[in-house]
Amino acid sequence: MNLQQLRYIHEVARRGLNVSDAADALFTSQPGVSKQIRLLESELGVEIFVRHGKRLVGVTEPGTAVLAIAERMLRDVDNLQQVGEEFANESAGRLSIATTHTQARYALPTVIRDFMRRYPQVKLELHQGNPQQVCDMVLDGTADIAIATEAIAEREDLVMLPCHQWNRCVVASPRHPILKEQPLTLEAIARYPLITYDDAFTGRGLINKAFLGRGLKPNVVLTAIDSDVIKTYVAMDLGIGILARMAYDPAVDRDLGMIDAAHLFESSTTRIGLRRRAWLRGYVYAFIEGFAPHLTRRMVENALSGGGEDYQL
């Protein structure tokens, strides 16, 4: 048994049992991967994968246990490498962040700018996706940190740390009557075509919950994953929009009017997600504290070690 074999079975499982894709990702050949998996199964005395002819079609019960152990071992190897890099060069390396469009576009730019000035030798990578995808990127090692809202809180396989609370606003073309509603109500919003976020993004569940609680069914005519896309179609007067408040900038969005809607919806919480018991480079702690000053290195280390994941803002 060797680490290469563990990497092979882990990557095959991660690639949906597609051996060819796993081989490509590992820069090796499909026959080589298949052979090493067979050798590992022979040594362990169990089959890890269910086969139909030459195709892998499932994971056996013992295979599930083997894959879980292999994943833990590979993470520990990664942690060992991180320890070596930390003490060899404390201010150089790589930091990969997985986040949603709204966070990348509106919440992170200043934090990233300040971080790059402080750590010019750290290569930053920014990956975007929905909350589920950004969590998966951390779990499979693509990213070091996940930053997202709502669905990320439900991931028990990651350590979740709350960063900021935020709420929503309604945007519309400047002469739209919704902007004159005082006070703004859900009933008033429900009278107009609505453009807002896709169900997987940016607190959409809390928007749905608010309308449902009042027995209302909003006329959602368009959904998007991107705040800028929503604003584009609102500016064309195709409907009114519900946005994260952080996504409206009066200096930039001069073709839109805005009315605050925080009194209508529950607040959402932006969270950072980290792999449990991960070893983080010193500059990763610095980035986290730059984004959420209350998350000190000591607090994050305590959470990673299992000493208190459920922090509240």
Image (cartoon, helix red, strand yellow):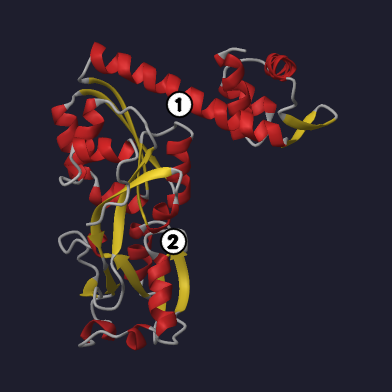
Front residue of this view, candidates 216 and 37? 37
Residue 312 in percent (x, y) is at: 25, 56
Q: Which of the marked residues, 2 or 1, is nearer the chain's N terminus?
A: 1
Residue occupying the point 27% across, 25% down: 281
Q: Looking at the image, is 261 positioned above or below residue 97?
A: below
Q: Looking at the image, is 61 positioned above or below residue 243?
A: above
Question: Amino acid type of disc 1?
Answer: Arg
Can residue 192 be seen at all in this image of the molecule?
A: yes
Residue 313 in percent (x, y) is at: 22, 57
* Disc 1 crowd, CA 10 A, few/some/many (<14, 14-19, 20+): many
Can residue 196 be seen at all in this image of the molecule?
A: no
Front residue of this view, candidates 264 and 110? 264
- C-beta proximity under 8 Å, tags 2 and 1: no
Residue 173 in percent (x, y) is at: 28, 75
Question: Amino acid type of disc 2?
Answer: Ala
Element class at badge 1: helix
Which dot marks residue 75? 1
* Disc 2 crowd, CA 10 A, few/some/many (<14, 14-19, 20+): some
The residue carrying mark 2 is 224
